[in-house]
Amino acid sequence: MATQTSTQAKSLALAKTTTHSKGRLRKLGVAGLLSELLKYVVLLVLAISFILPFYWMASSAVKNDNQIYTVPPIWLPSPALWNNFWDAWNTPSLNFNLYTYNTVVKYAIPAAFGTVLSSALVAYSFSRIRWIGRDTVFGLVLATIMIPSWVTIVPLFIIFKQLGWLNTFLPLVIPRFFGNAFFIFLLRQFFLTIPTELSDAAKIDGANEFQIMFRVILPLTKPALTVVALFSFMDAWNDYFAPLIYVNIDSQWVLALGVEKMRAAVYEMGNQQLAYPYLMAVSTLVTLPIFVAFFFAQRTFIEGISLTGIKG
Amino acid sequence: MARVIVNPLRSPAERRNLLLGVIFASPWIVGFLVFTLIPLGSSLYYSFTRYDLLGDPVWIGLRNYNLLLTNDADFRVVMYNTLWWVLISSPLGVISAFLMALLLNTNILGRSIFRSVFFFPSIVPVVVTAFVWQFLLSTQYGAINGVLQGWGFPIIPFLANPAYVKPSLVLIHMWSQGSAMVIFLATLQDVPRTLYEAAEIDGANSWQRLWSVTVPMVSPVILFNLVMSLISGFQNFTLPWLMTQGGPEKATEFYAIFLYRNAFQYLLMGKASALAWFLFVIIVLFTVLVFRVSGRYTYYAGGGR
């Protein structure tokens, strides 16, 4: 319990706000006030430029074929065609229910499961077992982050083709069961914070390494495992490139490919002006789960990102 | 434990630990061999062949490399585009992430809200980023040109003009630097306050504190973000592929797009492998160069971890 708190405390410290020296506000003169004001103006302008594209996406999603090309642009469409979401999702010739199923059940869930399991095993080896050459191998793991994935894409494609794996999700899912360097690094950092006494006590009680890992270490690092699961799920949800190469037939399309095909599908329907509203409608729907997840787990997201980057 | 071990592997405990360690690390070891090392080797082999996936690879020696370097006008355009992209977008991306982090690290109200807002674009699906920005920047229906037109300004062909398209993509790149920003912010918050207090006592103004305390203290993270950004910059694919398909007039035909076309549209697996290895060598050289140059300017607490 104590270790869990210390882990959390450590990660909390990362996101913690820094308090500035107290005397600062008192010392503010006119110039100081102006610079404070300027700071908030810059922050607000930035914030608007970050939010506006999403607002534009969502508001365009409910426009009709006239509202979409009005100058100056309409920011608050009236009437708002809420039906667009339903109609776009059910565009004939596309099947977004199927793409959602493919994305989640065939890709994201198995990929997240494989990533968590394999990365945890490897991270355990690099943090809780002392073996000769461990640090050299760990250095190698970190070095592989720099190998561009494009270098291996041709042979991997050929191998998967020869195995008959093209147009299945195996080329996307199976490699996830072999550890991910970023997540190995992240989990190792967490595993290192747990005192060795806990492992020793379990060993004395007759537990083997697997039991120590699954019964002692993993329960204590649930927050970190959640981060890894969340990120790898999201990677798969957002992935466009691997599905483009390996599972590019319509019965196996994922959401990213479905969104890409939206414009062509609307053109096929005959009313080209609806291409952008429909495209924005499905874009909004595909972004929504990410937004909701982020809204409820902001701290998890931000700490997770911080931890993958801090290595000095 | 007090016993002196001459050959570490002589002790049964050490041998058992090695075995266990390797077993636990085996997913990565096997994965590295199967999905990285062996493909690296075979792509080197394919790069010396002509291979269209139908017949067997035919050995043609250095011909693929030769043709690329001496007799391929497209390749020269692609190299120019890619180097332009890496040299402009990576520093600008890192700088904008750093500046946003600096801003968020000051004493402001609503920091976590701003942080979330700045961060969010980096986790939305790339497909969405691509189409939303394509729409925003479009000359016909785009919000930005719509507003400009409404104010009486001429239309700017952000994505339709070869001179504007790369800067437009850089802008979108800077817009989605949330992860780098969060990493910077976490690092900035780890800089000991005492250093700033000491600098203040010595009479340093805020500009001097930034250059003499903040930048040196976070320099390893600047380097990390820069290297990661260079590596991914060389492999930039999805955004230009979805937004401009390499156009207009090949202005966004980047390395990865060119490689993708050769491999998966023209099925020139030999040429694509030569491209892949050439890219690998360039990335390694760039990374080494960045580490060399930065070595003098990077500060590692505790004398280099």
Image (tube, coloured by chain):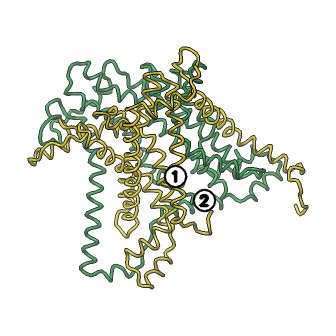
Chain colours: A green, B yellow
Decide: is B165 above or below A39. Answer: above
Decide: is A108 above or below A264. Answer: below
Q: Are marks 1 and 2 in contact (CB under 8 Å)?
A: no
Residue identified by numbered label 2: A7
- In what element is the residue under mark 1? helix
Amino acid type indicated by mark 1: Gly
Numbered marks: total: 2
What residue is at 88 percent from the left and 53 percent from the top? B7
- In what element is the residue under mark 2? helix
Q: Chain of mark 1?
A: A
Q: Is residue B224 left or right of residue A44?
A: right
Res. B39 image quadrant:
top right
Q: Position of residue B86 (x, y in %)?
A: 41, 47
Mark nearer the N terminus (1 vs 2): 2
Residue identified by numbered label 1: A304
The quarter in which the N terminus of chain A is drawn is bottom right
Q: Position of residue B102 (x, y in %)?
A: 39, 64
What residue is at 74 percent from the left and 48 percent from the top? A212
Q: Position of residue A82 (x, y in %)?
A: 24, 33
Looking at the rendered structure, whether the residues under marks 1 and 2 are on a common chain is answered as: yes
